[in-house]
Amino acid sequence: MARTIELQHFAGHGGRLGAARLQFPDAARPWIDLSTGINPHAWSGANDIAIDWRALPDEGDLRALEATAAHYFGADPAHVCALPGSEVGLRLLGAMLPGGHVAPAYPTHAAAFPDLGARPGRSLILANPNNPDGRLRRAGTLVEDLDSSDGWLIVDEAFADAISGESLAGHVGDGRRLIVLRSFGKFFGLAGLRLGFLIAPRDIVADMRARLGSWPVSTAAQAIGAAAYADTMWIAAMRDRLAGEAAALDALLARHGLRARGACPLFRLIETPGAGALFERLAMRGILTRPFAYAPDWLRLGLPADDAARERLDAALAHG
């Protein structure tokens, strides 16, 4: 039987390898972390960028980063604000927006907007692609829904980079109650850089900048982010690579009777009775996945980084 109490430690966020090492001390090494949905193939250009760690972040470089990111998003730079991670933007928005009910897509959203149900339904926050099921809502449909509503639509596009053509960033404007959040680290595989973006009407951008204060992102984030977003050849090639590796993961899971769900190639969701027991079995073999306290039959897996990791996952699923 799965150890339910211990599973709760892994249900809030992925990447908790420290907790996994403590709770599964006899697990095979090295650990394979499939719990986060972060691209296992990081943008390699970061190693070639010289960072002056003695200098404070430069405002001109910050605006250059925002302009480069805006071009990549297909948005007006006047509507783009760099963040020290998209989660910071989510939590600040919870205090900034006017009244309205906000329905969360996953627990981080509920934490950012804690007064759910206290106000009449007017606004909606959703993830696209959604986490953890990978559901993709078409941008055209979302725009139609927005234009027929008088509330705010907040779209968390943390995983949108892996899928071309479905972002709402280009639809943001001063006359529309639309806010988009983007994450840098997931697709570019550099989550530790802590870089994200708010794309919003200019009054919201101004309010966010005032709350963030001076130097909202580091010198390294400014330099690496700007260079990575400009690397169009790497971006296109990586999208193709991730799609192929997601298909390979689907086939691997299918061989063991597990059907993968989701349109986002960075992760797959499986639904199986006793998913907690499967989480523990994989953890004992040094493979960390993501369980869900509110859905005990769900387990989310990110992409294995290479053939060796896929072979270990295949063997762990085969020997139950």
Image (cartoon, rainbow, N blue to C red):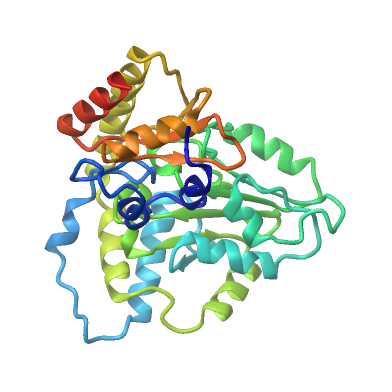
Rendered image quadrant of residue 316: top left
On the question of residue 172 being in view, the answer is: no
Horizontal side of residue 73 vs 228, given as left or right:
right
The answer to whether 254 is drawn above or below residue 133 in the figure is above
Q: Residue at x 35, y 46 (%)?
A: 38
Q: Nearer the viewer, residue 55 or 28?
A: 28
- In the rendered view of the protein, which quadrant contains the C terminus? top left
Q: Residue at x 65, y 70 (%)?
A: 203
Q: Residue at x 66, y 39 (%)?
A: 143
Place of residue 124 in the rendered image (x, y in percent of width and height, measured from the top left): 71, 48
Place of residue 310 in the rendered image (x, y in percent of width and height, measured from the top left): 23, 28
Horizontal side of residue 184 vs 311, given as left or right:
right
Q: Nearer the viewer, residue 33 or 320?
A: 320
Rendered image quadrant of residue 301: top left
Horizontal side of residue 141 vs 11, given as left or right:
right
Q: Nearer the viewer, residue 212 or 168?
A: 212
Horizontal side of residue 287 vs 96, given as left or right:
left
The answer to whether 47 is drawn above or below residue 302 in the figure is below
Q: Residue at x 22, y 38 (%)?
A: 305
The answer to whether 286 is drawn above or below residue 78 in the figure is above
Farthest left residue in view = 48
On the question of residue 260 being in view, the answer is: yes
Place of residue 8 in the rendered image (x, y in percent of width and height, measured from the top left): 52, 49
Place of residue 29 in the rendered image (x, y in percent of width and height, measured from the top left): 18, 44
Q: Nearer the viewer, residue 277 or 270?
A: 277
Farthest right residue in view = 120
Q: How many marks?
A: 0
